[in-house]
Image: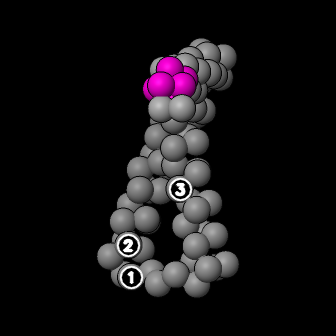
């Protein structure tokens, strides 16, 4: 059983990486990179509003700074097109 798990570990690692590269080729690097900001934001909203997790002032400031940087990136992307 252990040999089987070791045998499939390679393809189970390569297949998601291949699909990610193919998705970036099709969509472009900009939209693919935006998912790295949107997904954690969705997780934050789910954790804060649904699971009632604590949210400190330091985390709030970090969250605002990250989204401020994203807005600067989007503005630059929009102005260059």
Residue sitting at x 38%, y 61%: 65
62 on left or right of 25 = left
Magenta stretch containing residue 31, yes or no?
A: no
Secondary structure of residue under mark 3: helix
Q: Identify the residue position indicated by label 1 in the image.
A: 56
Q: Residue furthest left?
A: 58
| Numbered range of the magenta stretch | 3-8
61 on left or right of 35 = left
> What's the CA distance linking mark 1 and mark 2?
5 Å
Q: Identify the residue position indicated by label 3 in the image.
A: 40
Q: Which of marks 2 and 3 is nearer the N terminus?
A: 3
Q: Which of 32 and 67 lies nearest the eye of the viewer?
A: 32
Residue sitting at x 58%, y 51%: 39
Q: Identify the residue position indicated by label 2 in the image.
A: 59
Residue sitting at x 36%, y 81%: 57
Residue 79 seen from this side: no
Magenta stretch containing residue 7, yes or no?
A: yes
Residue density around tag 3, few if under 14, some if 14–19, many if 20 or more, within 10 Å = few
Q: Which of marks 1 and 3 is nearer the N terminus?
A: 3
């Amino acid at each position: 059983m252990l040999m089987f798990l070791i045998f499939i570990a390679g393809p189970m690692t390569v297949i998601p990486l291949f699909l990610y590269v193919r998705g970036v080729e099709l969509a472009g690097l900009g939209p693919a990179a935006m998912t790295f900001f949107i997904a954690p934001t969705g997780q934050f909203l789910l954790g804060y509003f649904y699971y009632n997790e604590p949210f400190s002032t330091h985390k709030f400031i970090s969250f605002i700074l990250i989204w401020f940087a994203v807005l600067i990136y989007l503005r630059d992307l929009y102005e260059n097109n």
